[in-house]
Amino acid sequence: MSTQPEGASPPDPEPVAGPGPTTAGPISDRDTIRAELATLSTEQVNERHPDLDALSTRELVAAMNEENRSVPDAIAAVEPEIAEAVEAIVERLRRGGRLVYLGAGTAGRMGILDASEAPPTFGTDPGLIVGLIAGGPGAIQQAVENAEDRDDLGRADLESLSITADDAVVGVSASGRTPYVLGALEYARSIGAITIGLSCNAGSPLARDANIGIEAVVGPELLTGSTRLKAGTAQKLVLNMLSTITMVRLGKTYRNLMVDLLTTNEKLRARAERTVMLATDVDAATAAKTLASVDGWVKAAILVLVTGIAADEAVARLRGGDGSLSAAIAAHAVEDPTGAAPDVH
């Protein structure tokens, strides 16, 4: 993917690598890259706002907000592909697989952000949703020279996770041509993992080569080529959808409440109590007492209050089933249709 075309002039000298792992490798022909960039909608000059430096601060704020309004429309156009991706991810996770995001720069950081927020929000194991970035953890805060140009690094990063056919791999790239991402997805496909390509340009190699392609075409950026703007926003929104809807489908929510959140600070403990109160109409003292009886597990506390069963039985039922609170409540209603339980709204 990054070989020197026959007859092309030699590449420019490689820059000295910055802080972080050494990732220097052959640089693709820059004439070819420039030609590719010229075809990408995310790299075009934005004709609506050609003179940013001549605008007032208030005008700049308005211009940026105007551009951002187009992002939801771009995502609406690919809702069927997003739904298809969610179903594929759910199927892999149900059989014991993982969800892996990977990308370079902003795209990689978006994946890491979404992965890191899953455990406190849904009580998942940190290894269930994993984020990888070209150049390794050091690239989260500081760019690592040439890392995104190495397709072999993408493969190596997936190999380090021992990826299997049970896993789902989501490659994220605004351009849809990042070698690190393309190399990773090629490897993932070769071992049978489901691959999903999220890009912000139509007809991208990433979407073409993935099992499921999601192309949220946001158009030219306010600042030419700065794909941390609309493209980054689109990536964030789509990844939110992939992880959140997957968790809903896996029974990690009850109605529209977070019932598997981890109560790791006072705000979250207060939120847990409020969630129990919302689900069961009990007062704060009852919510707190019930939560204490199930070691702070919101889902189990609600099951206790809705069904009237003992705390240890509620925990055992949820652990032994598929984890769905709605299913556990429905099963109890079948077993004991005349049992008295507090009303819920």
Image (tube, helix red, strand yellow):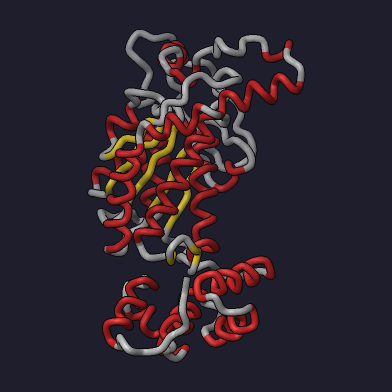
Quadrant position of residue 5: top left
For residue 178, say whether it is visible: no
Residue 93 image position (x, y, % from top left): 32, 60
Q: Residue at x 51, y 76 (%)?
A: 280
Would you identify the image quadrant in which residue 201 lies? top left
Q: Is residue 262 above or below residue 335?
A: above
Between 20 and 296, the residue placed more toward the observer is: 296
Q: Is residue 192 above or below residue 301?
A: above
The x and y percentages for residue 3 are 36, 22
Query: Total of numbered circles in the picture?
Result: 0
**In the rendered image, the vertical position of residue 36 relative to residue 165, given as above or below:** above
**287 to the left or right of 341:** right
Q: Quadrant of the N terminus?
A: top left
Q: What residue is drawn where x is 51% and y is 74%? A: 298
- Can the viewer see residue 147? yes
Q: Residue 121: percent from the left, percent from the top?
A: 52, 61
Compared across the picture, whether 135 is left or right of 142 comes to: left
Q: Residue at x 32, y 89 (%)?
A: 338
Image coords of residue 86 (percent x, y) = 33, 49
Instruction: Specify whether 187 is left or right of 144.
Output: left
- Is 286 in front, or is 217? 286
Q: In front here: 248 or 102? A: 248
Q: At x 38% / y 79%, what residue is drawn?
A: 319
